[in-house]
Amino acid sequence: MKLSILIPTFNQDCTQLVHDLLEQLPKDAEIIVADDGSTAAPIRENNATIAQLPQCRFWQAKMNLGRAKIRNLLAEMAQGEWILFIDSDAQVRSRDYISSYLSQTEGYQVICGGTGNFESCPSPDKTLRYKYEIHREHKRTLKLRRKKPYAQFSTFNFMILRELFLQIRFCNDICDYGHEDTLFGLELKDRKVPVLHIDNKLIHTGLEPTPAYLRKVKTFLFTLSRLDEKVQRRITISAIALFLKKSHLKGLVVWLFNVSNHQIKQNLFSKNPSLLLFKLYKIGFFCKIMP
């Protein structure tokens, strides 16, 4: 059984991640890193050195293709029977990370390892993102992930049979950030493909400062607004917004959002941001942009 580890990256130095993986990589496995048109030359050049490492390949896109397309291309390049997708802002925390995956393949075609976080916030300007990720981690215990295996599917750290992935693929229509994992999880559910969740986490290191994170959230919500309503009804933020629209409360919510937007942002930029206000901010913004 051959394994291909696939790492898409954009303006993220993933050389340390590759070196950590090489320490436990089986002899018949490979690592492929695909740079999705990075604009930061020093990072791009540093990642290009991965091509010189044993069992490694490096591919550079001439332009940014988007999260879905770059992952689909990686799967096409892979030679392994199994493909393991890892986001480039990940950190290996276990010496048996790869073997833990390979020991679970009997009877399953999709295996999710999970996402972990730093023990403390790396810097004050990243408090909102860190606090939100810790909240999500508490809601994504192994027990809860196994209870809702499709809803808890994430592209951050998962392994899948290459043949199955190429039948489904990520939706190429999604060029911006967000929801390619949502659609993939729903497709697995519709196909009744069993998904095994295991405790094999990678640490998520890509925490953005609050201004950049809020821009990312807005992109995420714009992507959500363009998805089919059947999909929106299965996602919390859009499902609430659709209910408010049906109840003729959308206009009121948008008005409240516009009136309170400044005050909410002041809280989100503070040392102790409220996750409740953050959720209300997302609902209000989505109501404002939804058709």
Image (cartoon, rainbow, N blue to C red):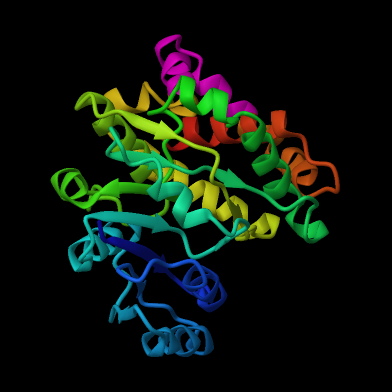
Report x, y in % for residue 222.
41, 44
Image height check: is 62 above or below 122?
A: below
- The one of 2 and 140 positioned closer to us in this rendering: 2
Residue numbers of the magenta segment:
239-256
Question: Which of the two residues, 52 or 246, is positioned nearer the viewer here?
Answer: 52
Direction from residue 117 to residue 2 in the image, left or right: left
For the point 45% across and 53% down, the residue is 99
Which percent across, then down, holds residue 246? 40, 12
Residue 25 occupies which quadrant of the picture? bottom left
Q: Quadrant of residue 48?
A: bottom left
Does 248 appear in magenta?
yes
Q: Position of residue 167 (x, y in %)?
A: 13, 45
Q: Is residue 149 visible?
A: yes
Query: What residue sits 46% from the left and 83% below the top?
Result: 47
Residue at 51 percent of width and 83 percent of height: 43
Q: Quadrant of the N terminus?
A: bottom left
Q: Is residue 226 visible to the viewer in this orientation of the structure?
A: no
Instruction: Relative to 141, say whether 155 is above or below.
Output: below
Residue 90 within the magenta-colored segment of the rendering: no
| Image position, residue 199 (x, y; %) | 55, 39
Q: What residue is at 52 percent from the left and 78 percent from the top?
A: 15
